[in-house]
Image (cartoon, rainbow, N blue to C red):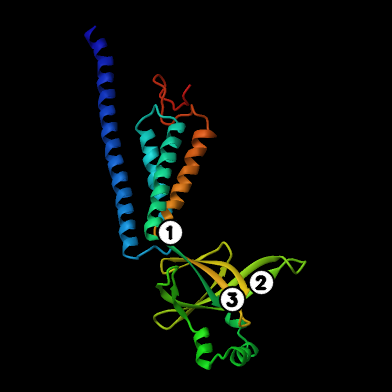
Amino acid sequence: MSSRKSVPSDKASAAKTAGRLNKRLANALYIILGAVTIALLIMTVYASAQGQNADYPIVSAVVFVFLGGALAVSVVAFNPQKSIYDIGFYLLHVGIVIFISGMIIFAVRGSSHYVALPDLSSVTEEVENQMKSTYGWSDKDIDRLRSYRNQIAGENGEIIDLGFNFRITDFDTEYYEDDKSVKHYEASLEFFLNDGTIETESLTVNHPIYRGGLKIYLMNVGLSPYGYEQVNLLIKNDPAEFLSVAGIILTILGTFMMCLLPKQMSYFRKKASKGEVTPNE
């Protein structure tokens, strides 16, 4: 009789021990993931304060998505009663917090500036002669027009150092068959590096270029009063862009898991009798 009664007692004791172990592991995982996330956020804020921004924010966005997802999944992994709806709930709220953090950092440290640069391929000899005869341009003025730019004027008239030298050497406009509607814009940007080498990159609408922590957008093109084509760019400094991207991804993923997947599906729940993983009833 006594030996038969000790079996359920042993099972209960083992289950209790396993539960304490799972709780300790869960707490350790929460602390690690939370510490890494907070440390990465602090480093981002510090880097933005020093003007040191990542050239490829999508990489950091993937890191934050991984951390947020790992944190949410770990909550469910060590709490079998949680459902896929609960995972979505955590991801949604983590995503909202991260997105708002990115917006606040951009409002404090970020900036956007519009700049118009000449398409040097349109500054032909005929245009140069017209600029000299009609507007009194000198050879030095034209050389300055053709030179590399490493500074732009801010909204309040302040001079902003870009940290790199560049100019627009060519601009191509592709039209539809009616020859009126624009189908494609493409600008060729030439960067003069510190070691004396030259790099060329193509810039198109909705496909910006990352350079020196800045994001360069192609907006449109127009004709300057002097007769050459003038390309309008948007230069954006968003030190926490990856936070906004990560927040949007997590928010969309969390909403999908909360609204479009069965609420009662659960992970890591086993049948007491057979030990099989089954969805919640």
Question: In front here: 127 or 204?
Answer: 127
Q: Residue at x 74, y 68 (%)?
A: 180
- Image position, residue 234 (x, y; %): 51, 66
- Real-space Cα distance between discs 1 and 3? 29 Å
Q: Amino acid at mark 3?
A: Gln
Q: Residues within 10 Å of mark 3 (few under 14, many from 20)?
A: many
Residue 162 % position (x, y): 41, 73
Task: Select label 1 or label 3 by which is in front.
Answer: 3
Residue in view at x 39 percent, y 82 percent = 195
Q: Secondary structure at mark 2?
A: strand
Q: Residue 137's x, y, as percent?
A: 55, 90
Q: Amino acid at mark 2?
A: Thr
Please say if 112 is above or below 116.
Answer: above
Q: Would you name the residue on which mark 1 appears? A: 57
Q: Picture quarter containing residue 117? A: bottom right
Q: Few, some or many C-alpha atoms within 10 Å of disc 2 (few <14, some 14-19, many ≥20)?
A: few
| Residue occupied by mark 2 | 173
Are dots 1 and 2 in contact, CB under 8 Å?
A: no
Q: Quick one: SS at disc 1?
A: helix
In the figure, is residue 51 to the left or right of 61?
left
Taking depth in this image into account, of 267 and 11 the one nearest to the observer is 267
Dot 1, how many residues are within 10 Å of its Cα: few (below 14), some (14-19), or many (20+)? many
Q: Amino acid at mark 1?
A: Pro
Residue at far top of view: 1
Asked if disc 1 and disc 3 are in contact, CB closer than 8 Å, the reply is no
**Residue at label 3?**
230
Residue 149 location (% of width, % of height): 46, 79
